[in-house]
Amino acid sequence: MSTITLIEAVKAHALANYTTGGWDYVVECLEDSDIAEEIAGATNEAEAIAAMGETVALLHDVSEDVRGAGDCGEFPRGEFPPCANVGPLA
């Protein structure tokens, strides 16, 4: 299969799963060349979607970790919670 066909399959899958597990990132942020890089070596649509899915899952996990990292409670302006690992604002 051509790379363009595989890219289109990945994009269609991403659009169909837009609200699921980070596939919106593919729709909103990636160029065709980015997708091609992630699916290099895939020989069919299922392999291409699976390859992109590995990257999407990783990015989604990191995104969820970052969102959760800010959940350390309320602190006055200019102060950071201990979990933020940063100093006071200058």
Image (cartoon, rainbow, N blue to C red):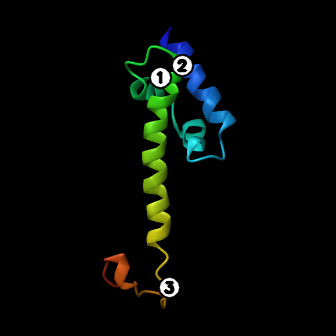
Whichever of callouts 2 and 3 sits on the residue coming sooner in the sequence is: 2
Quarter of the rendering occupied by the C terminus: bottom left
| 38 is higher (above) or lower (below) than 5 | below
Q: Residue at x 47, y 56 (%)?
A: 63
Q: Amino acid at mark 1?
A: Glu
Estimate how packed mark 1 is, as few (under 14), some (14 to 19) or many (20 or more) residues with alpha carbons within 10 Å.
some
What whole-number distance in Å separates the C-alpha atoms at marks 3 and 1?
A: 43 Å
Please give the name of the residue rendered at 47% of the width and 73% of the height, measured from the top-left corner: 70
Q: Which residue is mark 3?
A: 73
- Look at 52% across and 28% down and name the residue there: 49
Quick one: 17 or 36, which is closer to the camera? Answer: 17
State the separation of the CA atoms marked 2 and 3. 45 Å
Give amino acid for label 3: Gly
Q: Quadrant of residue 5?
A: top right
Q: Is residue 3 above or below residue 79?
A: above
> Is residue 47 found left or right of 22 in the rendered image?
left
Seen as rendered, the residue at the extreme bottom is 76
Quarter of the view holding residue 69: bottom left
Asked whether the beta carbons under mark 2 and mark 1 sit within 8 Å of each other, the answer is: yes
Q: Residue at the far right: name it.
A: 16
Binning the other alpha carbons within 10 Å of mark 2 as few (below 14), some (14 to 19) or many (20 upward) gives some
Q: Are marks 3 and 1 in contact (CB under 8 Å)?
A: no
Residue 39 placed where, x, y %? Answer: 43, 25
Q: Where is residue 33? Give x, y as percent.
A: 45, 24
Between tags 3 and 1, which lies in front?
1
Q: Secondary structure at mark 1?
A: helix
Q: Position of residue 18 (x, y in %)?
A: 65, 41
Per the image, the residue denoted by label 2 is: 45
Would you name the residue on which mark 1 appears? 47
